[in-house]
Image (tube, rainbow, N blue to C red):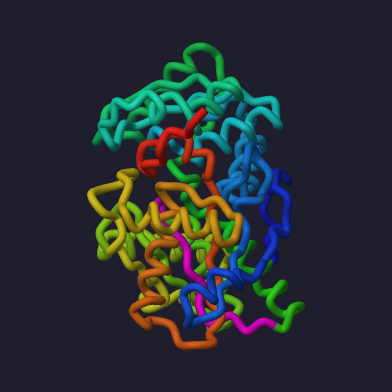
Amino acid sequence: MHLSRFPRVRLGHMPTPLEPMDNLSRLLGGPRLWVKRDDCTGLSTGGNKTRKLEFLMADALEKGADTIITQGATQSNHARQTVAAACKLGLECHILLEDRTGSHDPAYNYNGNVFLDQLHGASVEKRPGGADMPAEMETLAEKLKGEGKTPYIIPGGGSNEIGALGYVNAALELLAQANEMGLQIDHLVHATGSAGTQAGLVTGLAACNSGIPVLGVGVRAPQDKQEANVFALAQKTETKLGLSGVVSREDVVANCDYVGDGYGIPTESMVEAVTLMARHEGILLDPVYSGKGMAGLIDLIRKGHFKEGENVVFLHTGGSVALFGYPDAFGFPDYQA
């Protein structure tokens, strides 16, 4: 667990705050809600990928890279944070965006994260939904090598055993904060997609014998696939740390009932969750990840999944800039002059 053994560049504002959500707790009843503000990591509006990028970018620099390649969906928070990190480190950045929704809305295709990708100076190319994105990145890497570049490929979401170290570190940070505050955390809930955040958290918390269960609210894959992906990456992460058998299959739990019609497609429960957080806590969620994650948490509270008085921490993975790609989802009336 001595993470200083691994190369790391400092990119984020850490530790991120751990705050009570008293208004939402009163509104919903049941458990006491807290939020771990990884939307406040500071790198181009922040988000969870910054923690992963501290280790991934360090590995890229150690390997002599001058160019970064990564991929994601159109409104990828990961892509936006990756190009921002590349800017800070003086690296070129190429982004491939997969059209997973088929949306032709100009706001979705050119605003939000896509606007910031371009503002930070990335080259941005679109690929069709269902494309083999790892192969697309390899093809681009070969092209760039032919131009004399030294590219480094970062997987979607920064989710490999190097990136997951960022969330092993987040687990240690969360435990230190809880210990300092005298807070007994009964549950940790977050949105889970590319698996790196959940794999790192599960590995870190299990290695510390914390006894804190982690619930990932899925935003894309069905439950069996999501849990298998997280467990496989957690096993690779513990091996990276020199551990063995720390994470059991039972430690990996995902609830994928809140995906709706598909990845990045709005749901009524997401709109409600984003609106409740904005109006009762002054906190912005995003429509793809944290909005659906919070929708799951809210519904589970209403169903009595958590006991009254338990402390439930919601890990906010950031990404609120993506809201600007989804203005029509919220149905606000035109304001009057």
Q: Is residue 40 above or below residue 29?
A: above
162 vs 95, left or right, is right
Image quadrant containing the N terminus: bottom right
Q: Position of residue 250 (x, y in %)?
A: 37, 78
Closest to the observer, 335 or 15: 335
Q: Position of residue 198 (x, y in %)?
A: 47, 62
Q: Is residue 280 above or below residue 301?
A: above
Outermost residue toward the bottom in this view: 308
Q: Quadrant of residue 210?
A: bottom right
Is 334 situated above or below 170? Answer: above
Give left or right: position of 256 versus 324: left
Q: Does 187 lie within the magenta span?
A: yes
Is 87 drawn above or below residue 244 in the view shown? above
Residue at position x 70%, y 47% from top?
12
Please state the horizontal and vertical placement of residue 46, each as a whole percent of the image: 62, 45
- Left or right, 264 with reference to 68: left
What residue is at 59 percent from the left and 22 percent from the top? 119
Task: Specify the segment rendered in magenta.
Answer: 183-194
Q: Quadrant of residue 83?
A: top right
Which residue is at a point 50% across and 24% down the rendered structure image?
94
Counting from the top left corner in percent of width and height, residue 271 is at 39, 52
How many marks overall? 0
